[in-house]
């Protein structure tokens, strides 16, 4: 594991482990709930990729802004959006964080400056640039963290935003979660330059590629990048190499990759990886691990109970929230 | 006759086109290794190879533009866009290029391109994956817009579209892909310039297309039980509209209900209604009625999604109201 870990306290590491475990167990529960049709529509799990959202969120402050994709349950949870509200949203209940209207792909929480999950690939990037522009114009010191998959790097909106952000030195951290596949299309079937972080350099944007299965390495890289942004160096680009252990969404026979490849990547699972390292360093004992699991199980169960008890919005209010109640 | 799904009929159409014409190729996101986001192209990569079943990067504007260029230069591309919501990233290419090049070049160049895409709601995919925006495209001179609602049309429209010298957009409703039925063994190309009367009747015309056709047919069934004979018209082609078939039906029924999953404001249903006013006003016994989606982005929860979309009871109620 990376050297950076030496500087981290046991409490910090336990915190990271706790967050990754929360996200993992939450999503495993979602998978179960999907099978019994409590959750419908698309459901994109980030199982295997938790280290990235966990580490980047840990490096952000409450004033910073976040923009994510449809694979954003973990991002919302680690950002601090209550699990109850996220689970209720997965159900489509009105207690959900987006009042049920968005579902799994469209989690929004103004209180957490969580500007949403977007389901048009690349669609969140220009908007994230705009958040950063506004912060800059208002002389705020906040940063916008913008998450997207490597598939987005093929979209024009990616390139347009990269250029604008670099040109105008916007306070934005681009976080590419490179899990090698865009649905079923492997990176080398879709990119002439498969080294994604090199693309940032073509816009003269500082960029780094990091092992996205190593939460500490991502934490260190994100902290470095954020410090540079806050120092006025303009946007930074972080490519995190990772892998999605599950299907793209729920209906995906995964014809495009082998079981062996998936199994190989599972050996790099970020959660046991951190836990094992902490154990070897004497920082994690059985009772700590049990405590985390017990807390997380209780939290997930509570969130499910909350969502179950939630209400379906009455059909009478179907057309609310299309425009503001009282036009200015 | 063979038992077949709408999805398979679409696939047969593509396979047939690839076999008939070496200039034809399929290009789009995940059409190859993944097997197509709605599994339409499953198996075609193995059969035809990566030259003709081309996986593209996530670059809707880019690969649609490539399709336009290839079509102008001797090929007959079929571009697949996963859903109409993503086609918005390619609007520039479709509206500013594909639709205008023949005119701008004084007739020197044509764009014999076919773009297929999924449309519509019903799978709880929320507000960025569920809209019916085909009416927007039907606004644009230079484009032809098709909406196959039956197995025959899913199987037969593609080849005719490929033979067309101009860009043709084909909208496949997501709720139709799984519909199964029988298709004649010799089913083949069908005309793309005529609406079809799917059920004859004399009391009211239900004018619809695509994913709403099965609903209109169910409504007609329900109305029949109440001694109201509804005629169901499947538009099939949304641009150019087949006014003659619509007006001929109205001359008989004198009443119209338009059923469209798009919103009503500024829509295709508004256009049809206006044409009825212009061409058949004196034949009407009642104002034209419309059953469209509620004016709201499609919500995620099932009960709200259902409430937002045209449903059989609403069609029945509208028909009864115009019949009086
Ligand atoms: C503009 C657009 N085109 C296509 C899609 C369909 N789609 C949804 S996710 C996806 C793959 C995206 O891959 P990537 O950006 O790498 O993110 P990942 O899903 O791997 O997290 C595709 C093609 C979409 N949502 N938006």
Image: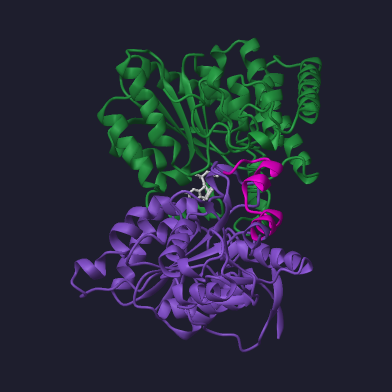
Q: Is residue A319 above or below residue A135?
A: below
> Whole-percent x and y of residue B56?
44, 59
The image quadrant of residue A168 is: top left
Q: Which chain is in purple here?
A: B
Q: Nearer the viewer, residue B18 or B103?
A: B103
Q: Is residue B52 left or right of residue B94?
A: right
The image quadrant of residue B184 is: bottom right
Kindly identify the residue that appears in the image at 36 percent across and 56 percent down.
Answer: B62
Q: How would you classify the magenta stretch by its main secondary structure?
A: helix
Does residue A275 appear in this view?
no
Q: Quadrant of the C terminus of chain B?
A: bottom right
Tell which residue pokes out farthest to the bottom in this image: B186
Does residue B222 appear in this view?
yes
Kindly identify the residue that appears in the image at 56 percent across and 55 percent down.
Answer: A184
> Whole-percent x and y of residue A101?
62, 35
Q: Is residue A263 left or right of residue B274?
A: right
Q: Tell me which segment is drawn in magenta.
A: B298-319
Q: Nearer the viewer, residue A90 or A165?
A: A90
> Whole-percent x and y of residue B248?
51, 77
As for residue B229 lying within the magenta part, the answer is no
Q: Is residue A313 left or right of residue A238?
A: right
Tell which residue pokes out farthest to the left in this image: B106
Q: Which chain is in green here?
A: A
């Amino acid at each position: 594991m990376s050297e950076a870990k030496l500087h981290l306290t046991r409490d910090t590491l336990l915190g990271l482990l706790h967050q990754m475990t929360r996200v993992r167990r939450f999503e495993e529960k979602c998978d179960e709930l999907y099978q019994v049709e409590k959750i419908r529509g698309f459901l994109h799990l980030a199982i295997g990729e938790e280290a990235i959202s966990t580490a980047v969120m840990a490096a952000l402050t409450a004033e910073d802004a976040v923009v994510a994709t449809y694979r954003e349950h973990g991002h919302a949870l680690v950002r601090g959006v209550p699990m109850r509200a996220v689970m209720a949203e997965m159900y489509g209940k009105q207690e959900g964080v987006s009042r049920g209207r968005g579902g799994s792909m469209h989690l929004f929480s103004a209180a957490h400056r969580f500007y949403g999950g977007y389901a048009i690939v690349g669609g969140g990037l220009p908007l994230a640039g705009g958040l950063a522009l506004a912060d800059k114009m208002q002389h705020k010191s906040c940063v916008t963290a913008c998450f997207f998959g490597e598939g987005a790097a093929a979209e024009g909106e990616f390139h347009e935003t990269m250029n604008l952000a670099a040109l105008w030195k916007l306070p934005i951290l681009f976080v590419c979660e490179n899990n090698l596949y865009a649905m079923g299309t492997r990176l080398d079937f879709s990119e002439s330059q498969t080294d994604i972080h090199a693309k940032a350099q073509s816009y003269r944007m500082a960029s780094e590629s990091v092992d996205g299965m190593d939460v500490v390495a991502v934490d260190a890289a994100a902290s470095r990048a954020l410090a540079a942004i806050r120092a006025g160096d303009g946007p930074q680009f972080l490519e995190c190499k990772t892998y999605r252990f599950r299907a793209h969404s729920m209906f995906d026979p995964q014809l495009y990759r082998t079981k062996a490849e998936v199994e190989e990547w599972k050996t790099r699972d970020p959660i046991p990886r951190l836990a094992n390292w902490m154990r070897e360093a004497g920082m994690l004992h059985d009772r700590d691990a049990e405590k985390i699991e017990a807390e997380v199980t209780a939290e997930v169960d509570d969130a499910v109970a909350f969502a179950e008890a939630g209400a379906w919005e009455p059909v009478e209010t179907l057309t609310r929230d299309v425009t503001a109640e009282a036009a200015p | 006759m063979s038992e077949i799904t709408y999805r398979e009929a679409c696939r047969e159409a593509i396979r047939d086109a690839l076999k008939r014409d070496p200039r034809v190729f399929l290009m789009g996101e995940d059409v190859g290794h993944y097997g197509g986001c709605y599994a339409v192209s499953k198996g075609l990569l193995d059969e035809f190879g990566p030259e003709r079943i081309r996986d593209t990067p996530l670059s809707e504007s880019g690969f649609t533009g490539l399709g336009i260029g290839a079509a102008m230069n001797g090929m007959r591309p079929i571009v697949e866009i996963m859903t109409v919501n993503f086609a918005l990233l390619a609007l520039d290419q479709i509206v500013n290029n594909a639709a205008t090049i023949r005119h701008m070049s004084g007739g020197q160049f044509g764009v014999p391109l076919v773009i297929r895409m999924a449309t519509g709601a019903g799978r709880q995919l929320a507000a960025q994956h569920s809209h019916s925006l085909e009416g927007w495209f039907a606004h644009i001179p230079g484009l032809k817009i098709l909406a196959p609602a039956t197995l025959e049309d899913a199987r037969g429209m593609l080849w005719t579209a490929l033979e067309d010298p101009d860009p043709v957009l084909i909208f496949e409703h997501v709720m139709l892909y799984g519909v199964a039925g029988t298709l004649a063994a010799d089913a083949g190309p069908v005309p793309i310039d005529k609406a079809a009367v799917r059920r004859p009747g004399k009391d009211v015309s239900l004018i619809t297309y695509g994913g709403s056709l099965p609903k209109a047919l169910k409504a007609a069934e329900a109305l029949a039980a109440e001694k109201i004979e509804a005629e169901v018209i499947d538009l099939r082609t949304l641009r150019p509209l087949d006014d003659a078939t619509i007006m001929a039906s109205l001359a008989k029924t004198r009443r119209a209900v338009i059923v469209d999953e798009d919103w009503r404001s500024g829509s295709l249903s508004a256009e049809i209604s206006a044409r009825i006013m212009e061409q058949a006003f004196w034949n009407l016994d009642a104002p034209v009625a419309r059953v469209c989606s509620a004016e709201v982005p499609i919500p995620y929860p099932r009960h709200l999604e259902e409430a937002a979309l045209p449903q059989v009871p609403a069609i029945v109620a509208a028909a009864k109201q115009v019949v009086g």
